[in-house]
Image (spheres, grey):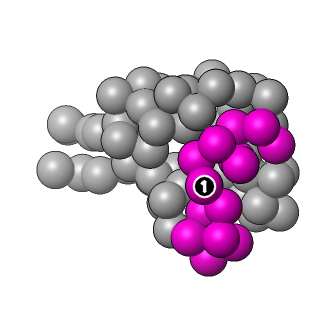
Amino acid sequence: MNRELDNNIAKFRAKHKLSQQDLADAIGVSRKTISTVETGRFTPSVVIALSIAQHFETTVESLFYFDEG
């Protein structure tokens, strides 16, 4: 079973017209953190994942999913 974590953060940001910096400022992390999470180079902590979900008023499962590639 080869699972990779993927996400919809960029889609949520676009829908809410937010830049990476806007989201980073809102949840108290760096823009680079948002960038590396979006591109899959960094797996976020539970705190970061929950903070992003809370910011968008959605569930973690709506933001993150396994790509069963």
Amino acid beneath label 1:
Ser
Above or below, 41 relative to 19: above
Magenta stretch in the rendered image: 12-26
Please give the name of the residue rendered at 64% of the width and 42% of the height, measured from the top-left corner: 21
User: In the image, residue 61 lies at what x, y percent?
Assistant: 61, 55
User: In the image, residue 64 lies at what x, y percent?
Assistant: 52, 50
User: In the image, residue 59 lies at what x, y percent?
Assistant: 72, 58
Looking at the rendered structure, the secondary structure element under dot 1 is: loop
Would residue 42 appear left or right of 60 to someone viewing this image? Answer: left
Q: Nearer the viewer, residue 31 or 52?
A: 31
Crowding at dot 1, Cα within 10 Å, few <14 / some 14-19 / many 20+, comes out as some
To which quarter of the image does residue 44 belong? top right
To which quarter of the image does residue 13 belong? bottom right
Q: Nearer the viewer, residue 53 or 3?
A: 53
Tell me, yes or no, if residue 37 can be seen here.
no
**Residue 68 part of the magenta segment:** no
Provide the residue designation for mark 1: 19
Please give the name of the residue rendered at 65% of the width and 71% of the height, measured from the top-left corner: 17
**Residue 15 part of the magenta segment:** yes
Above or below, 58 relative to 55: below
User: In the image, residue 2 lies at what x, y percent?
Assistant: 19, 37
Chief secondary structure of the magenta span? helix
Above or below, 42 relative to 9: above
Tell me, yes or no, if residue 10 can be seen here.
yes
Please give the name of the residue rendered at 82% of the width and 43% of the height, measured from the top-left corner: 26
**The N terminus - image quarter:** top left
